């Protein structure tokens, strides 16, 4: 079955239900509230949404209408949109508890756990013995990592329901998270006894098995934990909780082959279970078997069992691989199998069209969201941002934020718009607001830290990671940020604590060692970095430690030890010949040793294992540039840029546009001025904080558009683009007659390059223009201490004039 549907049909399918409902609203009597209730009683929730919207437009504060609307949204999978009406209805006397429970469900599904805890705590005061309140509050506290408070609520629930298995499992997980091993062991025994007493207790056997294995791991007995996980998986090979927890365990202990085997067996046991299909396919794709992965996913769409969900799973697969056209096409097929399309699902499709660059199609669908103010503004803003219109995009995002101030996505997108405009302080503020709205948002964290570090605001970055660590203590990615930033700031105690916590996660040890080695190298040179990695005694032939091997080879090459670098890379390739990253590392070692032809073969071997791998394409591009084949190098960098999937959300990579930038440098070196301008403008649309690109574009515009050149140069200088940006900014300011500002820019340039005579010369010129004759003489004299520099004759003439000679 082909994953392609005629493009124009999707508009009919998306807009049709909305248009039909609007037509009924315009031409037919509105159903009564009693009729709406009767529709919901028989499960026809989707059909009540539009009539309820119409009624709410006339009576926005009506508690019954808000209740029914919230229920309809919640039941149709639109939990985030249900929060607002349910919050309103829960304020009505008599509805506080029941609608408060619905509100908690909506927040847990579409908001933040902390917000759910706040609602649950209020409900607990109103109904201290209500079991449903306690269960949801425990769930919220566990998600918010409030383990101590969760234990108190568990104790209260077990007083009311002594054998409640969910509460007992929550108690076990909380105790394990708090490293209270003895109590966890007692909780595990109690759970086993309770399961025997419960009717249908066999249903809890997998959880008890997995809980016991997890307990053994947390206690430090990895061998016993591994044995028990193998027993659990043998007994329950297709139990979802056991399968995915087992996969996580084997990944953490550095045994990805066993994790893959677990997923393969689960898929073969239940080949129509979409979570297994999805996980196994993605595992195959990561192993370079993308054709087999796609075959499995397409088969799921053809078996007639999973219908639209299989297409959506396939769409997610393509989206993760940054194949946005194919993701949109797969989603089209899923939507075509639906009746009424919920706005949030339709919005996902439009978002895919935008990321695929299919702007006209996306724009044609925007009227379908005219009654969904938040969604409409987000999509319109996304489209404008993609088209390089950040000012208009910001207006749309801010309109959405006015409707929903705590929407982290809107805040994050507004920050991106501010970045494109060069309003970096406002971007920082919006990224921080996104993180406040969703404390576990890794994208917001990475984006905020990247920008703070580029602006030189390291103290603020340290505060951000400390707060994130407190709120998300179990997130290893957050710990990596703590290690990097605390290490650079010299916060030894914080660094040691984060290192200790991250070091017990096997799958992160390689990255941790690489970060710590980088700190050593920054202080004492590459030899110190290489020594640190060697002393860590990692198995560098294991793919999970590839970050440490990459760093080791780089440090060895930097100190000229090319033979040692190649031996380390060869050993890794011999240990894992199907790992594409190891072939790339070997290629880099060969390139450093001057073996360019062998390096090319190694990069191509990596590509044979994972086609369109961006790092391998970039390696081939660098080799092509070295041999003088500029056209081939540019084409390869363009492929690497496309393969790296820039169209997805920015995950805070400080080198996110590196391949596009490398291509621009090559185009510039070959004299293609117009092409350089086109490429620079495209890069700055997607990366408004690329300091080097800002500087180069400012140089191009210095004569033609001095106003924009000044703006771009200021942005580049703020982002610590380097002394050249300060020199450029100073010259533009001087040309505009802003002598005092120019002098300040040149002072900063001289501070960074005190031995550069041209810097002293330009500072002298600026000081003279600002009326500081004595300062100008001093700087010009300092410049003339050098025997040769481009402005020497002019410096002599200027100094003579200032001395009255």
Image: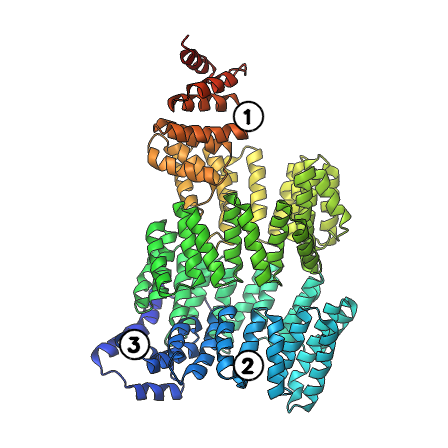
The residue that disc 2 covers is 134
Q: In which quarter of the image is residue 490?
A: top right
Which of the two residues, 288 or 534, is positioned nearer the viewer here?
534
Residue corresponding to mark 3: 56
Q: Secondary structure beneath disc 2?
A: helix
Position of residue 84 in the picture relative to residue 138 (left or right): left
Q: Is residue 182 above or below residue 401?
A: below
Question: As displayed, is residue 444 above or below residue 618?
Answer: below
Q: How is the image coloured?
A: rainbow
Q: How far apart are marks 3 and 1 (CA)?
A: 68 Å
Residue 294, position as x, y percentages in the image: 54, 64
Q: Nearer the viewer, residue 802 or 125?
A: 125
Which residue is labeled 1 in the image? 754
Q: Residue at x 57, y 63 (%)?
A: 471
The residue at 43%/53% (across/down) is 415
Asked if residue 247 shows in the view, the reply is yes
Quadrant location, the C terminus: top left
Name the residue at 62% across, 86% down: 159
Residue closest to the eye, 607 or 398: 398
Q: Residue 5, located in which quarter of the rendered image?
A: bottom left
């Amino acid at each position: 079955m082909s994953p392609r549907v005629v493009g124009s049909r999707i508009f009919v399918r998306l807009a049709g239900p909305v248009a039909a409902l609007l037509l009924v609203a315009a031409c037919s009597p509105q159903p009564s509230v009693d009729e709406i209730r009767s529709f919901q009683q028989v499960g026809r929730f989707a059909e009540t949404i539009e009539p309820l919207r119409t009624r709410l437009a006339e009576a926005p504060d009506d508690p019954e209408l808000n209740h029914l609307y919230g229920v309809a949204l919640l039941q149709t999978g639109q939990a985030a949109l249900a929060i607002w009406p349910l919050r309103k209805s829960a304020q009505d006397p008599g509805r506080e508890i029941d609608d408060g429970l619905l509100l908690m469900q909506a927040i847990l599904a579409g908001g933040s756990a902390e917000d759910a805890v706040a609602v649950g705590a209020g409900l607990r005061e109103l109904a201290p013995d209500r079991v449903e309140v306690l269960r949801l509050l425990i769930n919220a506290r566990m998600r918010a990592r409030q383990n101590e408070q969760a234990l108190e609520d568990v104790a209260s629930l077990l007083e009311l329901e002594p054998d409640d298995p969910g509460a007992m499992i929550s108690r076990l997980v909380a105790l394990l998270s708090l490293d209270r091993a003895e109590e966890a062991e007692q909780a595990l025994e109690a759970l086993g006894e309770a399961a025997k007493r419960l009717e249908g207790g066999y249903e809890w056997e997998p959880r008890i098995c997995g809980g016991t294995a997890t307990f053994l791991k947390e206690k430090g007995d990895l061998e016993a934990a591994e044995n028990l996980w193998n027993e659990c998986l043998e007994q329950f090979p297709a139990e979802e909780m056991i399968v995915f927890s087992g996969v996580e365990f084997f990944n953490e202990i550095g045994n990805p082959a066993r994790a893959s085997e677990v997923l393969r067996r689960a898929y073969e046991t239940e080949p129509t279970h979409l979570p297994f299909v999805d996980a196994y396919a993605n595992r195959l794709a990561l192993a370079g078997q993308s054709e087999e992965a796609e075959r499995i996913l397409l088969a799921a769409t053809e078996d007639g069992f999973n219908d639209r969900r299989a297409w959506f799973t396939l769409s997610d697969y393509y989206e993760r691989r940054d194949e946005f056209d194919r993701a949109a096409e797969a989603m089209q097929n899923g939507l075509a199998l639906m009746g009424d399309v919920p706005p949030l699902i339709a919005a996902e499709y439009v978002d895919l069209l935008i990321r695929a660059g299919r702007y006209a199609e996306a724009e044609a669908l925007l009227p379908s969201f005219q009654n969904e103010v938040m969604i409409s503004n987000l999509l319109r803003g996304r489209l404008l941002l993609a088209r390089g219109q950040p000012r208009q995009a910001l207006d749309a995002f801010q309109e959405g934020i006015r409707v929903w101030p705590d929407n982290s996505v809107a805040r994050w997108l507004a920050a991106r718009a501010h970045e494109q405009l060069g309003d970096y302080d406002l971007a920082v503020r919006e990224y921080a607001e996104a993180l406040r709205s969703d404390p576990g948002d890794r994208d917001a964290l990475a984006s905020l830290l990247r920008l703070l570090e580029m602006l030189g605001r390291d103290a603020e970055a340290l505060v951000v990671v400390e707060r994130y660590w407190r709120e998300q203590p179990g997130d290893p990615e957050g710990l990596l940020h703590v290690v990097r930033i605390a290490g650079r700031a010299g916060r030894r105690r914080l660094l040691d604590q984060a290192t200790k916590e991250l070091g017990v996660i096997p799958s992160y040890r390689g990255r941790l060692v690489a970060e710590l080695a980088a700190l050593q190298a920054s202080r004492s040179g590459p030899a110190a970095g290489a020594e640190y990695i060697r002393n860590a005694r990692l198995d560098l032939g294991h793919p999970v430690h590839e970050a440490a091997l990459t760093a080791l080879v780089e440090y060895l090459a930097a100190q000229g030890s090319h033979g040692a670098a190649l031996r380390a890379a060869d050993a890794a390739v011999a240990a894992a010949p199907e790992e594409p990253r190891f072939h790339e590392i070997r290629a880099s070692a060969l390139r450093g040793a001057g073996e360019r032809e062998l390096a090319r073969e190694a990069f191509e071997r990596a590509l044979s294992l994972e086609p369109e791998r961006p790092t391998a394409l970039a390696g081939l591009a660098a080799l092509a540039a070295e041999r003088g084949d500029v056209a081939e190098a540019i084409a390869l960098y363009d492929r690497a840029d496309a393969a790296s999937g820039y169209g997805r959300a920015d995950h805070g990579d400080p080198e996110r546009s590196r391949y596009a930038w490398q291509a621009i440098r090559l185009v510039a070196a070959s004299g293609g001025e117009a092409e350089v301008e086109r490429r620079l403008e495209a890069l700055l649309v997607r990366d408004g904080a690329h300091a080097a690109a800002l500087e180069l574009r400012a140089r191009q515009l210095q004569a033609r558009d001095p106003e924009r050149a000044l703006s771009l140069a200021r942005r580049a200088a703020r982002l610590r683009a380097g002394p050249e940006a300060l020199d450029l900014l100073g010259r533009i300011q001087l040309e505009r007659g802003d002598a005092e500002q120019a002098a300040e820019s040149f002072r900063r340039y001289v501070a960074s390059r005190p031995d550069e005579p041209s810097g002293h010369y330009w500072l002298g010129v600026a000081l003279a223009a600002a009326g500081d004759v004595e300062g100008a003489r001093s700087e010009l004299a300092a410049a003339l201490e050098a025997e040769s520099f481009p402005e020497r004759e002019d410096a002599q003439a200027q100094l003579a004039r200032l001395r009255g000679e």
